[in-house]
Image (cartoon, rainbow, N blue to C red):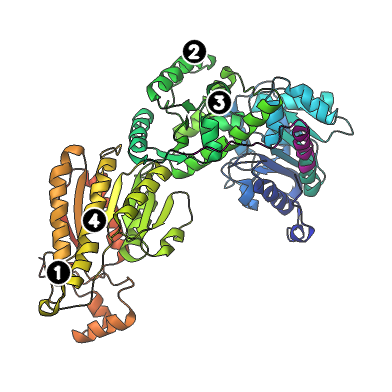
Amino acid sequence: MQSLWNAREAAEFAGDLNQRVYSSRLLGRDKTLVMHGGGNTSVKVLTPDLFGREQQILYVKGSGWDLETILPQGFSPCKMDVLLALAMLSELSDIQMANELRTSMIDAGAPSPSVEAILHALIPHPFVDHTHADAIIAITNTPDGRRQIEEIYGDRMVIVPYVMPGFKLARRCAEAFEEQAHEGTQGMILLKHGIFTFGATAQESYERMIALVDEAERYLERHHAFMVEYPEVAPPAEAQRLPLAAFRHELSDTAGFPVIVASHNDIQALSFARRADVRQVAQQGPLTPDHVIRTKRLPLIGRDIAAYVEEYRAYFEAHQGRSATPLTMLDPAPRIVLDGDWGMLTIGRTAKEAAIAEDIYRHTIAVISRARAMQDYEALPAEDIFDVEYWDLEQAKLRAGGKAPVFTGEIALVTGAASGIGKACVESLLARGAAVVALDINPAIETLFKRPDYLGISCDLTDEAQITSAFEAAVRRYGGLDMLVLNAGIFPAGTPIAKLSLADWDKVLRINLDSNLVLLREAHPLLKLAPRGGRVVVIGSKNVPAPGPGAAAYSASKAAMTQLARVAALEWGEDGIRINTVHPNAVFDTGLWTPEVLENRARHYGLTVEQYKTNNVLKVEVTSRDVGELAAELCGPVFSRTTGAQIPIDGGNDRVI
C-alpha cells in the first residue's frame, strides 16, 4: 500500500479542518480501506465562541457523508468538554448518546455526528483516522487473529476485543488505551472491526494508517494469503431474464416492497458461488458490524427464498430476548444471493443500495479467501450480529425515515430516450425513484446520465435481436421490468399520398409500429412479474384524432399503434398490466424544431414564433417535460384504475375537441 499524499495538493488545503478534508479524501479513494460511507476521521481544533472564549471542538465525520467526497461541512463540530463529560458516565444508552451528541454541536445545521465521536474525543491526539482495512479484517477475522496482530506489530498497537459500536465501545477503548498505550504507540486495533491511527498532523495520521496497513498486507503476502486468484468459469449462455424477473418478484413479495436485483456473473462472483464449501465459508456472517445493515446477516445460497425466510425467523425469535424493548422483525429478504448459474445477486430498495451491497460483498469474498488461505474465516457470533441488526439507533432511523419516492425499487424502460420527449420521460421517472433503462439508436444514450439507477443502451429498434438483447441487459442490471414507455418514432418530411413510395411508407411503419409490437411482445412476460403490476405508456400523436395533410404514413402508423395499445389493454388486463396512450401536439423543444423551422412555420400561418408555439385553446406552450411528467403520472397510483385510455396533451386543439 502506497501513500497518496501530495505536498503540492495538500498546500491548497489551508488550516487543520481543510487538511482533515484532504487526508480523508485520500483514505476514501482506496476502497481496500473504506467503502461507501464506512470509516471516519476527526480533528480537534481551538476556536472562539460567540463571546470570544476559546473552546476545543472535535470535528468528526458526519452521518451520510463519504470520505472520498467529503467537504468541510461534512464534519460535525462537537464541544470536546461535553464529549469528555459524557465519557465519564457509568451508563448511557445509545439513543441518549445520539441525542447528546447532536446537542453538543455548535452548528445546529451540521450532520449528525458519528456514533464513535466520544471515542475520537478520548484519543489524546489532534488527528484520528479509522478504517475497516481489508488486510486488517482478514487477519482479525481468523481464530488466531489477536496473536497474529501481536506478531505483526508487537506492542505498537492497542488491541481491543470486539465490542459493539456506541458508548460501551468508547469506554472500553478508553480503558484499553490507558492500560496499553505508551510513548511508542502508533494505533489501535479493534478486533473484527478495524484500525485507528492518530497523529499531530493530518499527514502523520494518514501516512501512519498507510504504513500500518501495508505491514498487514506484507504479512498476508508472506503467508501466501494476499493475492486472491479465482479460477476461470463460464457463465451460462442461455437467456436469464425470465427466471431472474420471477426471482425478483418473489424477493419483493418477501420484503414487502419492490426491490432492485443486480446480477453479477464475472469470474470472482461465479467462482465464489461455485465453491464446494460456499455454504460453510459464506454463512458465518459479515466482515464487520458496519456491514450487517447493508448485506444482512447471511447471503442466500441458491434460490430457496422460503427456506431462507424460515431460518431468518428462527434467528430472530432466538435472539429478540436480548433487547429490553419488544422488536418488530425487519423484512426477512436477503441482500446477497450466491447461485452457481447466476453468480452473485445484490439486492436493495434502490440501485444505489444494490451497488453498495455489491461493493461490500466483493470485499467480503476477498477477505474470506485471504482468511481461509491463512487459517480460517471466523465472523462475529450470531448474537453480536443480531445486536447490530436490531440496534436501537438503526431502529430509530427506520422509524424516522421519510417517505420513499413513488417508484422506489421499480424499473422502467424508455425508447427514443436520447432527447426530446424520451429524455424528459427518463428524467421524470428518475425523479420519482425509478431505475431507468433508456434505449436509442444514438450512441450518446450510453452516457446521458452517470448514476447507478440509469442504464443507457444503444439499440436499433428495427432489429429484433438487439431488442431482446436490451431486455436481457436491463433485467441483469436491475432484476425485472415494471414500466415501459414507447416513445421512439420518426416524423418524415411531408409527402402527399399521390407521391408516397412504398419504401417510405414501410420505413415509417417499421419504426413507429412494427418495432413497438416486438417491444410489447418481449416486455409482456416481464411486466406480468412486476410486483405492483406492469404499466405501459404509449406516446401517440394529435394526428391520431386529427390527422394533417402530407402525413399519411406518420398518421397511419400512430393510429395503428393506438389501436394496438387498445387491444393490448384488453388482452393484458387479467395480467394486471395497464396500458394508456398520450397524444401530444406541437412540442417544440425537440431537435426536430430548429429556430429556422419554427420561424418558417410561424410565418406560414401569419403568426409570430411565440404565437405559433401557443396556438391552442389554452394559449399555453406544451414542452417535453410536460409530456414526460404526464407519462410518469400515468404509471403512478393516481391512474391505478385506468387502462386503455387516450389522453391529449396539446393545450386544447379545436379539431380534437
Residue occupying image coordinates x 69% and y 48%: 24
The Cα atoms of the two marked residues, 1 and 3, are separated by 63 Å
Mark toward the viewer: 2 or 1: 2
Q: Residues within 10 Å of mark 3 (few under 14, many from 20)?
A: many
Q: Secondary structure at mark 1?
A: loop
Give the camera-side residue of 481 and 6. Answer: 481
Q: Residues within 10 Å of mark 1 (few under 14, many from 20)?
A: some
> What residue is shown with label 2?
318
Outermost residue, right direction?
A: 183
The Cα atoms of the two marked residues, 2 and 3, are separated by 21 Å
Residue occupying image coordinates x 13% and y 65%: 556
Residue occupying image coordinates x 58% and y 44%: 111
Q: Secondary structure at mark 2?
A: helix
Is residue 552 visible to us here? yes
Q: Tell me which label, 2 or 3, sits earlier in the chain.
A: 3
Above or below residue 471? Residue 597 is below
The Cα atoms of the two marked residues, 2 and 4, are separated by 53 Å
Q: Tell me which label, 2 or 1, sits earlier in the chain.
A: 2
Q: Tell me which label, 1 or 3, sits earlier in the chain.
A: 3
Residue 228 part of the magenta-drawn span: yes
The Cα atoms of the two marked residues, 1 and 4, are separated by 27 Å
Give the camera-side residue of 627 and 237. Answer: 237
> What residue is shown with label 3?
282
The disc placed on residue 653 is 1
Q: Which residues are magenta?
A: 210-235
Contact (Cβ within 8 Å) of mark 2 with mark 4: no
